[in-house]
Image: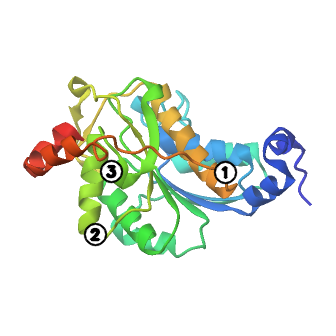
Amino acid sequence: MQDLTWLSRTQLLVGENGISQLQAAHVLIVGLGGVGSFAAEFLVRAGVGTLTIVDGDVVDPTNRNRQLPALATTHGQLKATLMTERLLAINPELNLTTISEFLTPDKIEEVLSLASYTYVMDCIDSVTPKLILLASAYKKGLPIVSSMGAGGKMDPTCLKVSDLFDTYQCGFAYYIRKRLRRLGVDRGIRAVFSTEEVQEDSLIMTDGSNFKRSAYGTISYIPAAFGGVCASVVLRELLQRPVALAQNPLINSKKETKRRNKIQPDEMKEIW
């Protein structure tokens, strides 16, 4: 019998039944960078009983400004291993499966078949694996929350939650949903995004490894804020609490709809 005294403050908020619901849940988190590492910790501290975490990356010195497992003493160590130690230190009775591999397209189906997940959290910042994970989980009918672009932004009050196909003023979300349509994905994926304009001069090109060709500058608290909102979506939906979804104001504007119908697809980037 587990001693759940450490969850007594959470129980005051969600009730005994709520704790039971969280304990019974199994959440898959893919990506343990600035967003996913914080999201994983928030879920465990809230009382989620079973977690599967996936990430094949090691800590780089440039991760220290925003990622939970990144310390001056952990350079070169696997993020998944470090997060395993941290999460089990929070809850030694956590049912935790750790996959210290990059989730390549070939690996995604295998991971999704490992268990009956209650919820899937996508915290991947590389386009191809993100698309395949979202499409595969969607076609299996799994509830999903996906983090959009956190780079190049500094205002956490601009974060919103919506259906992926209702996101707006986020270029990364525009690109993801455009590609997902081609893969047969429609509405039903929760997305966490920011309407803040990206600071374009913070963009750098990378070596293209792990499906990632570029990156924006980041500040310490924005990825953590994204992780917090992602975790809140999962927890509230597990507890059957309402999650207010933002609506695209451009879709609701007849004038804007007419204007969008007259422009070319490439010009849409400036609108969305």
Q: Position of residue 199 (x, y in %)?
A: 27, 25
Disc 3 marks which amino acid?
Answer: Ser
Q: Position of residue 269 (x, y in %)?
A: 18, 42
Label 2 sits on residue: 183
Crowding at mark 2 (Cα within 10 Å: few <14, some 14-19, many 20+):
some
- Spatial separation of the CA atoms under disc 1 and disc 2: 31 Å
- Spatial separation of the CA atoms under disc 3 and disc 2: 17 Å
Q: Is residue 115 shown above or below 22?
A: below
Which quadrant of the structure image shows residue 256?
Answer: top left
Crowding at mark 3 (Cα within 10 Å: few <14, some 14-19, many 20+):
some
- Spatial separation of the CA atoms under disc 3 and disc 1: 31 Å
Of the residues tagged 3 and 2, which is closer to the observer? Answer: 2
Disc 2 marks which amino acid?
Answer: Leu
Q: Is residue 102 shown above or below 259?
A: below
Placement of the N terminus among the 4 image quadrants: bottom right
Q: Position of residue 248 (x, y in %)?
A: 35, 44
Left or right, 63 with respect to 216, comes to right
Label 3 sits on residue: 126
Q: Determine which of the numbered discs, if any, sits on residue 241 in the image.
A: 1
Specify which label sits upstream in the sequence, 3 or 1. 3
Disc 1 marks which amino acid?
Answer: Arg
Identify the residue shown where x is 56% and y is 74%.
114
Between 125 and 107, the one lying in front of the other is 125
